[in-house]
Image: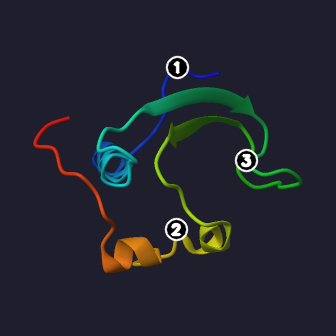
Amino acid sequence: MHDLAAIDRRQFARVVENLLSNSRKYSRDGQAQIEIQLSEHRGPVEKNSEADEGDWLQIRWQDHGRGVEPEQLPKLFESFYRTDAARYGAKRKRRSSW
């Protein structure tokens, strides 16, 4: 494995900020418990794929919030897609700090 990963730091920071925000916003008790796992891999990103051969990293993010309904998962990464709870406002406790 190589020691460096080529990423757009600003976009990656936006992703992490969004994940932190959503984990907190949709937590069950107003506090987010988050588990982050980083894994190194070798080979194609998807099974039976010739594209993206090489070494790659996987970041697994898990919180213990309300989650997303299984039927909404395929649409989750579509631009501007929001689940019904997010669209109509989820009930949540607000805290002023993490």
Q: Is residue 92 above or below residue 35?
A: below
- Of pointers 1 and 3, the one earlier in the residue sequence: 1
For marks 3 and 2, give the CA distance: 18 Å
Give the amino acid at mark 1.
Asp
Which of the two residues, 81 or 50, is positioned nearer the viewer here? 81
Q: Residue at x 49, y 30 (%)?
A: 35
Classify residue 13 by image quadrant. Answer: top left
Q: Label 1 neighbourhood size at 10 Å, few (<14), some (14-19), many (20+)?
A: few
- Of pointers 3 and 2, the one earlier in the residue sequence: 3
- Left or right of 38 on screen, residue 86: left
For disc 3, the marked residue is: 45
Tell me if I can see residue 65 in this picture. Answer: yes
Residue 81 in percent (x, y) is at 45, 77
Q: Describe the colour scheme in one phrase.
A: rainbow
Query: Mark 1 and 2 residues: CB-CB less than 8 Å, in contact?
Result: no
Q: Residue at x 23, y 52 (%)?
A: 93
Q: Is residue 35 above or below residue 70?
A: above
Give the amino acid at mark 2.
Phe
Which dot, 1 or 2, sits closer to the camera? 2
- Of pointers 1 and 2, the one earlier in the residue sequence: 1
Query: Mark 3 and 2 residues: CB-CB less than 8 Å, in contact?
Result: no
For disc 1, the marked residue is: 3
Residue 42 in percent (x, y) is at 75, 32
- Left or right of 62 on screen, residue 15: left
Residue 2 in percent (x, y) is at 58, 22
For marks 1 and 3, give the CA distance: 19 Å
Which of the two residues, 41 or 84, is positioned nearer the viewer here? 84
Find numbered disc 1 in the image and state the secondary structure of the residue it sits on.
loop
Which of the two residues, 25 or 61, is positioned nearer the viewer here? 25
For disc 2, the marked residue is: 77
